Image: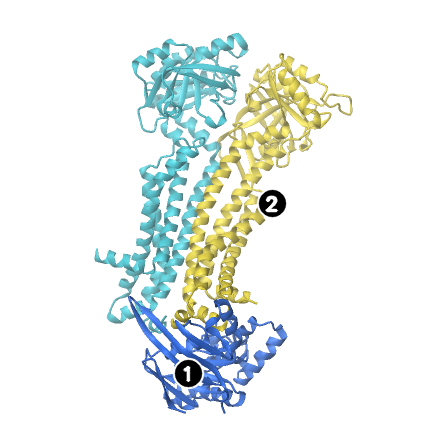
Chain colours: A blue, B cyan, C yellow
Amino acid sequence: MEGRPIVEIENLSKSYRRGNQIVPVLENISFAIDEREFLALMGPSGSGKSTLLNLIAGIDRADSGVITVGGVDITALSETELARWRSTNVGFIFQFYNLIPVLTAFENVELPLLLTGLSGRERREHVEIALSVVNLLDRMDHYPGQLSGGQQQRVAIARAVVTDPTILVADEPTGDLDRVSAAEVLSLMDRLNIESGKTIIMVTHDPRAAEKAHRVRQLEKGVLSNVSP
Amino acid sequence: MLALKFLIRNAFRHKLRTVLTITGVAIAILAFGMLRTLVGLWYLGVENSSATRLVTRNAISLVFSLPISYKDRIRQIPGVKGVAFGNWFGGIYIDEKHFFANYAVDPKNYLELYPEILLSSDQKKAFFHDRKGCIVGKKLADRYGWKIGDLITLKGTIYPGQWEFVLRGIYRGAEKSTEERVLLFHWDYLNETLKKTVPRRADQVGFFMIGVTHPNLSAEVAVAVDKLFKNSLAETLTETERAFHLSFVSMTEAILVAIQIVSYVVIVIIMVVAANTMAMTARERIAEYATMKTFGFGPGHIGGLVFGESVVISMIGGVLGIILTFPASRWVETELSQFFPAFSISPATIYFDLLAALVVGVVAGIFPTWRGATIRIADGLRRIG
Amino acid sequence: MGIPFSYSFRNLWTRRLTTVLTASGMALVVFVFAATLMLVEGLRKTLVETGSIDNVVVLRKSANSEVQSGVERQQASIIETQPEVAIGQEGQRLLAKELVVLISLPKRESDNLANVVIRGIGDNSLLLRPQVRLVEGRMPRKGSSEIIAGQSIAKRFKGGGLGETIHFGMRDWTVVGIFNAGTTGYSSEVWGDVDQLMQAFRRPVYSSVLFRLHDSSDFEKFRTRVESDPRLTVEAKRETKYYTDQSEVMARFLRILGTTLTIIFSLGAVIGAMITMYAAVANRVTEIGTLRALGFQKKSILGAFIMESLFLGLLGGIVGLFFASFMQLITISTMNWATFSELAFSFTLTGEIVSKSLFFSLIMGFVGGVLPAFRAARMNIVEALRTS
């Protein structure tokens, strides 16, 4: 049950410089993502799906066009404002988990909260809730090196949701996991979407992951097309 | 040569890190060389002294003088070729910053005893004839732009008053290391003035220089001189010029030792830095080494690569440091001339510099070389990135 | 709130070997830095404390030290009658006419000779020097061949101990007392009766006159009068200034040497820190990208890496200071270039040196880490994340 559009993209273009050449990756695409949608973005390598994801998440800048997330035109924000925006509006899930190795699971999940004004006690509450959602409360004092791949990814998911962000973006979340762990992670994401109403935008190669999503779009040569509603 | 090219390319894979390490080694070698030179300067007096010249002074200390009448009695001792005498004058030119040694001597005998002081016969004659004349070494003359005929005024500290001298000669040293920053004038001028002003200080000398006919006789003559004046009002202590200078050096030994220790500490510090660099480099390339081992390269090859890189980096730094030593010592000679009017690098120091750079490279490379050579292929391959 | 300190701190701990190596380099530098400062301070303390501000030393004009100076008997008497001289409890003028010469004495262990100051003292000499106390034995009897030695002499020179004898001036002199002079230069002196010593050395003139000012502010008045008096060829200095001037040359040399060495060393240590920090940044590219993606500002990243290198510097500083403090156990004996006499002094650690050293180590850490930290902060997020 999706709602109004939460991400609106208008005439977005982005190119990269490779040596002396300028390679266009996205050319004037426009589309919208609705609230509570679970979207999978697929496409061949180099099609620009990760680029699109990065632009929506505010970690890259478009050459032209407007991106509105949750009513905020992020293309108009300064670097500093964009960072601040990210801390409360975007939750990231990376292929290689990207946990800080010298921090415990608890501390890793706490990290985004340090950018808010919450007190130590309030932060603790949020972290514990997030960790229990991913079922890893008992491992909160473990370092990433002491956790399996699947467990690390779940900690990463807890970190992604702890600030209650507007959108969750995931770049190949199951890319480094075995079948069982991948399935666990995907069903977790599914639950987050259905039970907590989180909007999830996922880039993936993995057809099983795409299956779990509710909507799949293909990005090919800069053109977005629907694959399944 | 191919290996060397490969080593250098490898070393510069990580340009910034390698450049930083080379800079560090260069600075350390520069410091090492300069400090060694500093220590060498201390011993300069010792180097310049001869084994056929003896110094006789008052046995109590340099602060006490000897009667001039001793001269003739010393002359009689068998083995003595010539006797000269002098007083350390300690005069100040302009101010304390412009320090140089100045002595009142008996010109004829003194110059005979010091054949390394080269003076043209005209200038020598002019000097001998002018009671108020003086001669200076070329380096000193160059420094102050003195010409023959100039008036030089020294402010006396031990012998108070303003003393004026006429420059009659500029001497060159026979060896490169001969002291050319000394001013010599007539002892008679000093003595005549003292007789008029402070008569009780007249007819006293600070030291006698004795030339012996044969170096083997030095010890004998020294003993004979001291025996002659034992139990007199002014007992003497006679030793070779070399021993005399050495005793001065030993008085400031503590500082010398400290400086030498410090020069080695510099090398240790840079060794630590270089070792750090090599350890990092080796750690990053473990996977590569493991891969090379799969092709059949042995531990010796891998070890050689790591070791070679370490040595190449430190030798480049060493050479750079040596090159920098020359302008640096020029700077010391001009800016710190009060302390170090001469600060030149000897060939021995350069060899030591190279040796030090080599040692740094070797020590820094030991642990990473061992690590790289002994890594098991499977372990190495697992550590990707 | 920025990135927590524990991040920086734990990263240092994780790469322990590198941290230890880099911090060791810095520790060595701080050691040399602190040791040099301690040496200069020790020299200054010894020479400056050797003197009271209320005392005046009168020497022959343009003599740089007592050893070079000669004050005739009549001149000494004229000075004695000056009104600025203080009067003691027993109505005596607090003034001493002294003789200072150097003699060569052999050291105890090595037989090397050193020039030692022998001071012929008067009745008031001890009174004028409150830093000096007789701790063993007694004062020499007038008219006898007896002497007293400073503790440094007794310890380090042959014949300088209580009951031992030193031979000079054709006589044997017995050491009947040992005096403690704190850290002042007097510790390296031998004292005897001035008249006896003048006879033995055949010196008919004094070296200097020392007296206490009746009123400390009278100094200028005294100096102007005495230096313009045609009967006198003297100059006067406050005792403190006299000793400070003597340490000038050596102190300058030590300071220049120390500063140069420190600059060179710190360049080496900073380079070491830079290499370490650049490597740290390079190893954590993905982490940095992640933190930025999460919303941490560039300046937080900058701060975290600078904090890490500051920690490194501080660690090095503390270790270096720790070892430097042991230098206080060492006494240096060397020849004072101004007076040609033996001088013993030790390394002195002061609070100021401690704070200077720690500050210096922090600066080193900062300089070493600032460029790498900027590199970390200015990374492009997407590129950083792509590196896995």
Examine the rendering and report whether any part of residue A148 can be seen.
no
Amino acid under disc 1: Phe
- Rendering coords of residue B137 (x, y %): 37, 22
Q: Is residue C186 left or right of residue A101?
A: right
> In the displayed structure, would residue B235 be above or below residue A142?
above
How far apart marks 1 and 2 lie (CA) works out to 71 Å
Q: Is residue C99 left or right of residue B1?
A: right
Residue under label 2? C350
- Rendering coords of residue A62 (x, y %): 40, 72
> In the displayed structure, would residue B358 be above or below residue B303?
above
Examine the rendering and report whether any part of residue B74 can be seen.
yes
The answer for which chain carries disc 2 is C
Amino acid under disc 2: Thr
Residue under label 1? A31
Quadrant of the rendered image containing residue C280: bottom left
Quarter of the image with the N terminus of chain C in it = bottom right
Dot 1 surroundings within 10 Å: few (below 14), some, or many (20 or more)?
few
Q: Report the number of numbered marks.
A: 2
Quarter of the image with the C terminus of chain C in it = bottom left
Dot 2: element = loop
Quadrant of the rendered image containing residue C58: top right
Quadrant of the rendered image containing residue A204: bottom left
